[in-house]
Image (spheres, rainbow, N blue to C red):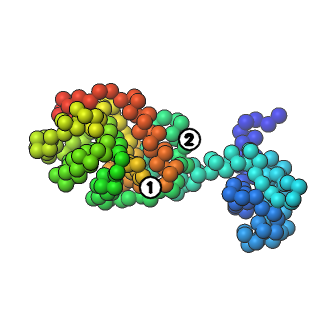
Amino acid sequence: MKSDSEEIAGEFLEISSEQRLNLILNLSTEKSNLSSMARKLDATPAEVHRNFGRLQKAGMVKRDSDGNYDLTLYGRTICSQIPTIRFMARNKRYFESHGFADLPTKFVQRLGALLESDMVSGYVKVIEQWENIYKNAEKYIYNILIEIPYNEKLVQTLQDKLKNKVAISSIFSESAVISKERHDLLSKFDFSKFVKDGTLERKMLKDAKIALIMNEMEAGLSFPSDSGEPDMSKMFHSTDRSFHEWCLDFFSECWKNAGAFQESKIAKC
């Protein structure tokens, strides 16, 4: 009887071939006959037939009565895990110096949802993208704030959005890095009325590590350094639906676990 490691190694062997991997990825979008797939992959029918045979034997592919190949449930499930591998492989260098901190396992398992994203590099460009996400918001703005670059332009944008009934929900980390301008800007811009009418909601987490900013259409996400320190010099940004859904679910999880906002804790930072 095969051990678990032997069995899993055998399954990886079946998709270690570039052509077999391309076969199942293509079948994940539509079924195909032998000749069509050979043309699509610029391969000989004999090559494709041999690899289809291996995938059938492995239980990943089946053939219907019309001669078309399609994925089995097992094959489709294997395909659904490939985006996570692609995301990590594409960003391997980034994750050599960054970590997931205490990201729940259920979100690590869904990292493939972040595949269709662009890396924004440079602190200035990241903050510019933040401001664009704020400006583009028409329904809501959700934040997880671990480093807060208060400036008059950004705070003015937030106030304008609140006046236009754009709901803002922010989670502050108790260890957040706060700019010195915070006190003066809060004195100039009075947000208390928005807190009272519920348009502006705030909560706190003991030590949030992952920064998040999103509106109803786009999101930005920054992971901490591998030592756990905030790093706002790089950010994944996307308007992709799966990316947005991952971010929304993560924000909702953090919001559920966050405590009441306490200004005194921010003031000590």
Q: Quadrant of the N terminus?
A: top right
SS at mark 1 in the image: strand
- Residue 251 pos. (x, y %): 41, 39
Confirm whether residue 229 shows in the render: no
Task: Identify the residue at horizontal 49%, vertical 54% (top origin).
Answer: 240
Q: Report the residue that reaches farthest toward the right.
A: 65
Q: Which residue is mark 2?
A: 109
User: Which of 19 and 73 lies nearest the eye of the viewer?
Assistant: 73
User: Which of 178 and 188 lies nearest the eye of the viewer?
Assistant: 188
Q: Quadrant of the C terminus?
A: top left
Depicted 69 relative to depicted 43: above or below: above
Q: Is residue 235 left or right of residue 12?
A: left
Q: Is residue 168 left or right of residue 264?
A: right
Amino acid at dot 2:
Gln
User: Which badge, 2 or 1, is on the more N-terminal residue?
Assistant: 2
- Residue 220 pos. (x, y %): 39, 51
Task: Identify the residue at horizontal 28%, vertical 38% (top origin).
Answer: 199
Whether the residues at callouts 2 and 1 have beta carbons within 8 Å, the answer is no
- Residue 264 pos. (x, y %): 18, 29
Task: Identify the residue at horizontal 52%, vertical 54% (top origin).
Answer: 115
User: Which of 100 and 262 lies nearest the eye of the viewer?
Assistant: 262
Q: CA distance from mark 2 to mark 1?
A: 19 Å
Depicted 70 relative to depicted 177: above or below: below
Q: Which residue is mark 1?
A: 238
* Mark 2, other Cα within 10 Å: few <14 / some 14–19 / many ≥20: few
Confirm whether residue 204 shows in the render: yes
User: Which of 55 and 129 lies nearest the eye of the viewer?
Assistant: 129
Task: Identify the residue at horizontal 31%, vertical 42% (top origin).
Answer: 167
Which of the 4 quarters of the picture holds residue 176? top left
